[in-house]
Image (spheres, grey):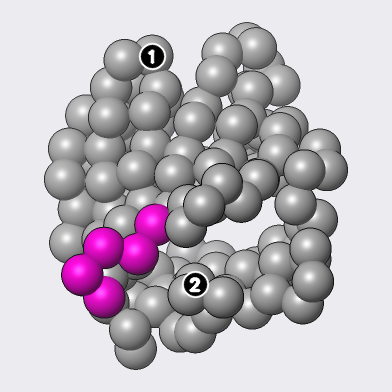
Amino acid sequence: MAFDGNWKVDRSENYDKFMEKMGVNIVKRKLAAHDNLKLTITQEGNTITVKESSTFRNIEVVFELGVTFNYNLADGTELSGTWTLEGNKLIGKFKRTDNGKELNTVREIIGGELVQTYVYEGVEAKRIFKKD
């Protein structure tokens, strides 16, 4: 799988506006802008493991493609949803458990970089990762 490997965040686009729309306070937004996020992604069959390591937390998320699971963002926001593999894209469709609003995410490899795009309430942001 093209996503397998170790990835380190390189840059972000419109991430502060996205976090603001999500309701993240300014202090957490400023900290998140410099979180040094690293992802380790592995796939075995339909099971994907994502290890997230940042300034704020280290977690391991294991999910099966197409199966609903619960996930907490770094700011504590609870989500429920699924990841699916569509062509060369990992598509995440989640709903916040507090207000039912949708958060959609796409992970894809573009020019050797892992581009993670988020859309929430019409605000789009990207985090771009390079192989570590």
Identify the residue at image location x=35%, y=64%.
109
Of residue 19 and residue 7, the one placed in the foreground of this image is 7
Name the spot of residue 41 as percent of width and height, x first. 57, 75
Please give the range of residues in magenta.
108-112
Of residue 54 and residue 63, the one placed in the foreground of this image is 63
Name the spot of residue 35 as percent of width and height, x first. 33, 64
Name the spot of residue 95 as percent of width and height, x first. 64, 23
Above-or-below relation of 57 to 29: below
Taking the image as shown, residue 96 lies to the left or right of residue 105, namely right
Amino acid tagged 1? Glu
Q: Secondary structure under badge 2? A: loop
Quadrant housing residue 120: top left
- Residue 3 numbered mark, or none: 2
Q: Secondary structure under badge 1? A: loop
| Residue 111, magenta (yes or no) | yes
* Residue position for label 1: 121
